[in-house]
Image: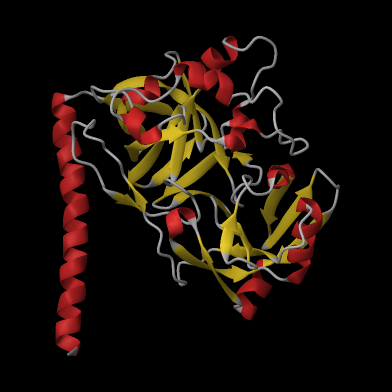
């Protein structure tokens, strides 16, 4: 039995390694036919430690298979769960989540609410020592587990979000059950084979989302009065690029030694209309109102995404490494947008 089990593990591992090697070799051969073109540089890098809370700008980051990492900070490694109903919650449920700024230093996670001015700290060592596991329904009905961060954080969340529900902050651990895999949706638009599933922690659609400065500028030029900051769109990586919406056509993205692959266009929801200063909805429903005038998905994708406009693209990762602000960005294009 042990021998058979070992053979199974060896076979699966060999297949996985073989698949990755095949993809890398395919890309190397593909680049000989399709030259990677320089399109710009990395403008900003953002990590969002707690799902649906504010992000943190960092000067560089490690690109792992499940998202960005900078020191102790890991992207979407915490999330809020409503244990009363056994389901994860986001700013769609509690708009004031976007008024909470997380930070993490020396093993201590701090949350500061800009709505009521209150703060709370929790030692990660205590979380791991207690090992209280919370199970919840996550994005698209997948089941995830996380380590409970304790009663003090729970009370902080109730006060900051104005809820009487049993809200729990949970921390991701690779040792716990996680049903989530982000599917790569090609919709027959890609001209090379790519990874079909991507590892995620508590992210929704993929481990990375990129946008360009030119896309943001073009959007803002269409507004009459107010201008939107990049914080509204919450990218992982903002790229300084001259051509608006050039990212729609990116198939492979190369930054330093890291290779990313297109997964899907990033559809935009009601969260983009929430003012992160006070948790209120934008009265004119921007940016969705303007985006729906010119950024609804093209062609066959319209039937899939309906009235959800697209802005930016979700990426998977082929191989990891370190990226820095001002790193050059090269891409291999595909023929069809999004």
The residue sitting at 44% across, 15% down in the picture is: 244
Residue 305 vs residue 14: left or right?
right
The residue sitting at 61% across, 47% down in the picture is: 52
Q: Position of residue 67 (x, y in %)?
A: 46, 49
Seen in the picture, residue 290 relative to 324 is either above or below; the reply is: above
Seen in the picture, residue 103 relative to 302 is either above or below; the reply is: below
Q: Position of residue 262 (x, y in %)?
A: 32, 36
Is residue 256 visible to us here? Answer: no
Is residue 197 visible to us here? Answer: yes
The residue sitting at 21% across, 44% down in the picture is: 24
Figure coloring: secondary structure
Q: Nearer the viewer, residue 182 or 235?
A: 182
Hey, which quadrant is residue 310 in on the image? top left
Q: Position of residue 202 (x, y in %)?
A: 50, 55
Screen quadrant of the C terminus: top left
Total labels: the figure holds: 0
Screen quadrant of the N terminus: bottom left
Q: Nearer the viewer, residue 41 or 185?
A: 185
Residue 282 vs residue 312: left or right?
right
Hey, which quadrant is residue 328 in on the image? top left
Seen in the picture, residue 294 relative to 263 is either above or below; the reply is: above
Residue 218 vs residue 279: left or right?
left
Which residue, as the protein is rendered here, is positioned at the far bottom? 1
Q: Nearer the viewer, residue 36 or 244?
A: 244
Q: Position of residue 141 (x, y in %)?
A: 44, 59
Hey, which quadrant is residue 331 in on the image? top left
């Amino acid at each position: 039995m042990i021998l058979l089990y070992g053979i199974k593990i060896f076979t699966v591992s060999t297949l996985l390694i073989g698949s990755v090697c095949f993809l890398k070799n395919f890309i190397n051969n593909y680049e000989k036919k399709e030259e990677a073109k320089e399109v710009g540089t990395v403008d900003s890098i953002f990590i969002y430690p707690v799902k649906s809370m504010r992000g943190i700008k960092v000067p560089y980051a490690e690109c792992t298979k499940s998202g960005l990492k900078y020191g102790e900070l890991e992207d979407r490694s915490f999330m809020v769960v409503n244990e009363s109903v056994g389901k994860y919650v986001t700013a769609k449920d509690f708009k004031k989540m976007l008024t909470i700024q997380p930070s993490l230093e020396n093993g201590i996670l701090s949350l500061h609410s800009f709505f009521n001015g209150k703060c709370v700290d929790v030692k990660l060592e205590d979380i791991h020592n207690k090992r209280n596991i919370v199970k919840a329904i996550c994005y698209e009905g997948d089941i995830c587990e996380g380590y409970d961060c304790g009663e003090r954080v729970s009370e902080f969340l109730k006060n900051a979000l104005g809820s009487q529900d049993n809200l729990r902050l949970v921390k991701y651990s690779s040792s716990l059950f996680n049903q989530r895999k982000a599917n790569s949706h090609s919709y027959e638009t890609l001209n090379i084979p790519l990874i079909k599933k991507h590892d995620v922690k508590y992210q929704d659609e993929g481990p990375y989302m990129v946008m360009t400065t030119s896309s943001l500028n073009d959007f803002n030029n269409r507004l009459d009065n107010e201008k939107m900051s990049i914080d509204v769109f919450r990218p992982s990586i903002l790229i300084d690029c001259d051509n608006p919406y050039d990212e729609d056509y990116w198939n492979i993205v190369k930054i330093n030694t890291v290779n990313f692959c297109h997964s899907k266009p990033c559809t935009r929801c009601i969260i983009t209309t929430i003012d992160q200063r006070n948790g209120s909805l934008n009265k004119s429903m921007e940016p969705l109102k303007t985006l729906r005038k010119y950024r609804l998905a093209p062609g066959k994708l319209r039937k899939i995404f309906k009235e959800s406009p697209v802005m930016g693209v979700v990426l998977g990762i082929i191989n990891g490494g370190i990226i820095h602000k001002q790193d050059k960005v090269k891409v291999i294009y595909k023929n069809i947008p999004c």
